[in-house]
Amino acid sequence: MYFSSNIRLLRKRKKRTQEVAALALGFSRSTLNSYENGAITNPTVEALINFSNYFKISIDTLLRVDMSKLSDLQLRELELGYDSYVRGTKLRVLATTVDSKNRENIELVPAKAKAGYTAGYNDTEFIRSLPTFQLPFLSSDKKFRTFQISGDSMLPIPDKSYVTAEFVENWMEVKDGNAYIILTHDDGIVFKVVYNHISNMKKLLLKSLNPAYKPYEVNINDVKEIWRFVNYISNEFPEPVTNNPKLSNTVARIQNEMNKIKDLLGVTQEEDKN
């Protein structure tokens, strides 16, 4: 049972002294100290409920999960309320890696590893097998991962581009019209523009930048991970702007109108001479 070490860890993460935490819990400081040091080995049901309500984490998790072995991201998920016993939903625990300086790595999920990622996204051993790197211009306080996309559904972002994205902890914060990497049970990794219908329909609406692809919905229960688009890298050099068909048509129309004006001016000048 990990109750004593867990409540001590959670209190320190909340940056509360024993005096402050004990007052909120309805205990004396000495009683709380006894709980944290394991002197009280059989907490009462009432005490367990108080701790669960205070930390917003289920009794089962407080008792059975060794939180000292969880990553900072995993602990933050628990503290944000993503506890399966409290919320009635599956706990989203992110498997992650760090470098020799204990900095979060950016793991690379190449196209050939997409199927493996769909099955092993929460498998620490699989995540450790992925290539890793660092990008110094990205925030060290956030978690990033890079995915190689496939297909032309997000043109002008080309096929085989590497999309770097930020891990989204709170899915309610997904913003309409922004691009995200979505991991689903059925479709695996997809890169789409997303519209958030979680609060009223329990769904996300996914749209492609390429109008040839129709929008579709996914049930939020089928979603495993959400990553917010940050940037992308491609070895394809972009086409010159002048090759853009829409722009070319606009230029041609303007030139045609100019020619008509010149023709009219030419006729007028000839009439003046006569």
Image (tube, rainbow, N blue to C red):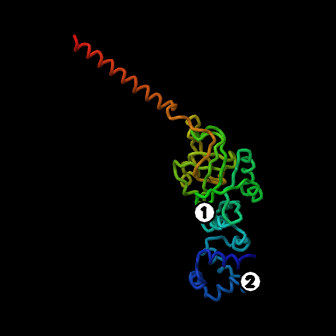
Q: Which mark is residue 183?
A: none
Q: Is residue 271 above or below residue 166?
A: above
- Taking depth in this image into account, of 197 and 105 the one nearest to the observer is 105
- Quadrant where the C terminus sits is top left
Residue 190: x and y in percent read 64, 46
Identify the amino acid type marked 1: Ser
Quadrant for residue 171, please give it: bottom right
Quadrant for residue 168, please give it: bottom right
Q: Sequence order check: which comes first, mark 1 or mark 2?
A: 2
Q: Nearer the viewer, mark 1 or mark 2?
A: 1
Residue 136: x and y in percent read 61, 58
Identify the amino acid type marked 2: Thr
Which residue bears the numbered disc 1? 140
Q: Looking at the image, which residue is at 43% across and 28% down?
A: 251
Q: Is residue 142 above or below residue 230?
A: below
Where disc 2 sits, the SS reads loop
Q: Is residue 153 left or right of residue 98?
A: left
Where disc 1 sits, the SS reads loop
Q: Is residue 197 above or below residue 3?
A: above
Q: Residues within 10 Å of mark 1 (few under 14, many from 20)?
A: few
Q: Is residue 47 above or below residue 202?
A: below
- Quadrant where the N terminus sits is bottom right
- Taking depth in this image into account, of 186 and 264 the one nearest to the observer is 264
Q: Is residue 215 left or right of residue 94?
A: left
**Residues at circles 1 and 2 in contact by the CB criterion of under 8 Å:** no
Residue 247: x and y in percent read 47, 32
Which residue bears the numbered disc 2? 41
Residue 269: x and y in percent read 26, 16
Taking the view exactly as shown, the residue that stands out farthest to the top is 274
